[in-house]
Image (cartoon, grey):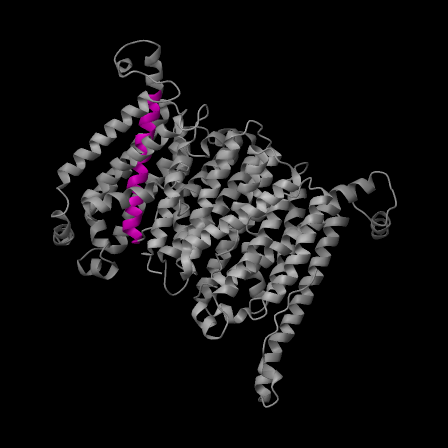
Amino acid sequence: MAITTTELLDRPRSSSASGPATAYAVMLGLLVVAALASVLIGSRLVPPTAILEAGPDRTVVEVRAVRTAMGVLAGVALGLAGACMQGLTRNPLADPGILGVNSGAALAIVLGIAYLGAGSMTTFVLLGLLGAAIASLAVHAIAGIGRDGATPAKLTVAGAAFAAAASSWTIAVQLVDQTALDIMRRWQVGSIGGRPWDVVVSLAPVFLVGALLAIGLSRTLNALALGEDMAKGLGRHTTRDRVLVGLAIVLLAGTATAAAGPIAFVGLIVPHLVRTRTGSDHRHLLPLSAGYGAVLVLAADTVGRVVLPPSEVQVGIMTAVVGVPFFLLLVRRGRMGL
Amino acid sequence: MSAPTLPVTTPAERPEVHPDLRLATRRPRRRRRLVLGGLAAVLFAAFAVRVLLGDYTFTIPDFFRILFGEQIPVSTFILMETKLPRAVLAVLVGVALGAAGSLFQMLLRNPLASPDIVGVSLGASAAGIFALLTLGLRDGAVSVFAVVGAVVISAVVRWVAGTTGGYRLVLVGVGVAAAMTSVIQYLLARSNTWDVQLALRWLVGSLNNVPWSTIGMLAGALVVLLPTLAYLARSLEVLELGDEAAAGLGTGRHRTDVLLLVGVLLTAVAVAAAGPVAFVAFMSGPIARALMGGRHSLVAGALVGAVLMLLADYTAAYLIPDVVLPVGIVTGAVGGPFLLWLLARGAATGRTG
């Protein structure tokens, strides 16, 4: 049944786009370029030959390689989470940062450091996931007040309000607990630099489960995109589907936040840009969003390293620089069903 | 402080009205008088508690003797340099934020649409930090920058949102608020002198170490702004019906804009003095409205704001021994549960507020 759905979605687009194969090839090409740039460009420019030869430049390459891996992980997770959120809520403004999920994860991690004695990356990830889950539920519940339910606009405002409240609590805990302050200060802005390799390793399992779950749910998302009634009519268990998609979002947004701190707007921008090229079939939208999410995070991070020397602009700030005008453009286009 | 009043054209003012109708309009009026009187009494009590009690208590005669210039060792300093300025500033900031919050929620017809969520407070604090850290300005000049910043940011929000207003204005505000947060984080991360007290003032709002001159400037600004608001807010109920209906009744978009500008200025002067104290503007309106039995009231909103600030400041000062928390931490921490309260109330009555 889902096949009919996706065929319906495919047909009008397949003529305009030059086929998904080209889209994937372009995405992979850009990803390789972004990864190379992320390894070679920075306060110290490294020649490409350093990747192969031993020497002082090799050390720089190794440090930046960890950073690049971190960027790919966070970017893929955010791109997928954004695409899933937009599909699930049928909300063009959905983004883990805007809807307060990242701030909820941050708050849970701070509370864990201060009151549960959390210290390892594994506990951070678990706390991040828990916080992300609670935040998503709370924001949707708050936005769901009233007869018209959780409209995109109400979700956005509820997310902003929740994020403001959560970050007040985060600062409050940090003021009282010095350890939490020390750990969180670097992490808070959203940065992929300065993380050891173990972080990537310990995040990888959760990340992989979330990513595979999301990709596996692409047909489900196609059905849900038709609306509650239509999806039911096609024989879908919409409640079960929603719970599964929600689980994928929480896993992905939670890992991204645990890895890189709150980075907003990647999950917002990427699915929109991908949709303009390949249409809204989630079977292609999800993998492409994942790839371009990584490209965007790596590009933002690399530009942030060189844009204002000698200091570095964190990736979370760079994505906001691109993301805010994009968000305003979406609002101005006014396709929010207000 | 002058109290803005909202004269309502009630049927009771016309002679031919039915007695039942007259009774129906009189009851809310009695409630209004009762609530406002009660709030004023609570405000007075909270002020007295904040000034007289705490880790260093004063007797009432001592309080007046010090106030009228008598020098008592230690006591004079503690009262005149820490307790009294904090309490007075708390009241002024609370009144400004409470009135501004109620005004925004009324005009934009959304309980979530307060100046702290739509970017006005953050615009003021971003401009303040810019003046302080990047331009190296101090005191008065920083305040001027904060006020100008709030006005400019609000103008940008209004311009981007276009004439449709309402929800789109709120959404654009949320986006701009995100941008301002990034600007603040960037400025703080770049500055070499990471002064935690300074940073906290502009990040979360704080009443610590504010000089009397700043309080004087805030009071002066309120003396101008509050009567202006009272004058302009005469027929707010009409505006609450929506732009089209308001235009049909002869009051239009233009009036809304001027009122929003007054709200922006009120927020800006408060933020310039004490930083973006989270959620006071957001909480005052709905609490006042619940007290007034579902009617909007700017006066009640302002009083609730002042009471909230005083209570939050008392909590911030004495919650943890030897640590004076910034007041914004307490208001922000209360803001979360308050959101849930809005949720519960909305679920019970089936509306957004």
Q: Position of residue B21 (x, y in %)?
A: 57, 85
Read off the magenta span: A64-90
Q: Is residue A318 visible?
A: yes
Q: Residue at x 58, y 28 (%)?
A: B193
Compared across the picture, whether A130 is left or right of B345 comes to: left
Quarter of the N terminus of chain A within the rendering: bottom left
Compared across the picture, whether B294 is left or right of A147 comes to: right
Q: Is residue B300 visible?
A: no
Q: Taking B94 as reference, is B13 above or below it? A: below
Q: Taking A110 as reference, is A336 above or below it? A: below
Compared across the picture, whether A260 is left or right of A180 comes to: left
Q: Residue A208: which quarter of the image?
A: top left
Q: Position of residue A41 (x, y in %)?
A: 34, 22
Q: Is residue A274 magenta?
A: no
Q: Position of residue B164 (x, y in %)?
A: 40, 61
Q: Position of residue B258 (x, y in %)?
A: 54, 61
Residue nearer the viewer, A120 or A214: A214
